[in-house]
Image: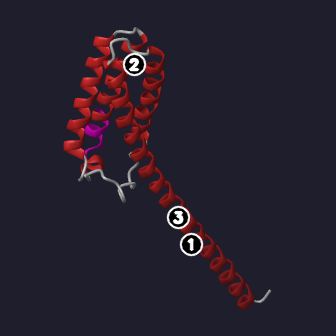
Amino acid sequence: MPVSKRINTLIAVLSLTFGLTAMSAQASDSVSAETKIRDVESRQHAFSQIAKQQKQIDRALGKSSPDWQQLEILSADLLANSASLQYLFVPGSQSGSKAKSKVWDNNIKFKGALAKMDNSFVSMDTAIQQQDKGMAKNALKQANSTCRNCHRQYRSR
């Protein structure tokens, strides 16, 4: 094969390779953009569910004779939503978020606040399992306090 044909073939192969690489990178960018949007939507949904479940649990604990079976179900769902938050604040998923930039700038401190909230919900769940109304109310109160403090520090209005 003459040198000029080899060079033309090499140029064509390189062009094809670079073109495919660029297309692959664009596809990767669109997937990661979709993933980032999904992360924001997932954590907003989890927070909405947590707020709703906290209110339901608070009302149920306010009754003179709580429905412990219902409380166990609500608590288990709340725990699942709370635990999911540890994995939903992915770097790069700030766009469209209500979270302040320091969520990502000081992630260890923020993750600690999430863990504190989660631990309060675990304590509440334990109390519900033991049908200890007072302990469950105190743990829920502690979780609510953690939520308020976290919103003040890390949520944009």
Residue annotated with mark 1: 22
Count neighbours of disc 1 (C-alpha within 10 A) and say few if under 14, some if 14 to 19, many if 20 or more. few
Gap in angstroms between the C-alphas marked 2 and 3: 40 Å
User: Position of 115 compared to 151: left or right?
Assistant: right
Which structural element holds mark 3? helix
What residue is rendered at 48% in x and 23% in y?
73
Locate residue 50, reporting x and y percent. Answer: 38, 35
Q: Is residue 31 above or below residue 46?
A: below
| Residue 67, picture quadrant | top left
Of residues 108 and 37, which is closer to you in this image? 37
Circle nearer the N terminus (1, 2): 1
**109 in the magenta segment:** yes
**28 in the magenta segment:** no
Q: Amino acid at mark 3?
A: Ser
Q: Are marks 3 and 1 in contact (CB under 8 Å)?
A: no
| Residue 53, picture quadrant | top left
Gap in angstroms between the C-alphas marked 3 and 1: 12 Å
Residue annotated with mark 2: 125
What residue is rendered at 56% in x and 72% in y?
22
Locate residue 37, reporting x and y percent. Answer: 45, 56
User: Position of 14 compared to 56: left or right?
Assistant: right
Locate residue 23, reporting x and y percent. Answer: 59, 71
Q: Amino acid at mark 1?
A: Ala
Locate residue 130, reporting x and y percent. Answer: 40, 8
Of residues 85 and 31, which is closer to you in this image? 85
The span picked out in magenta is 106-112
Q: Amino acid at mark 2?
A: Asp
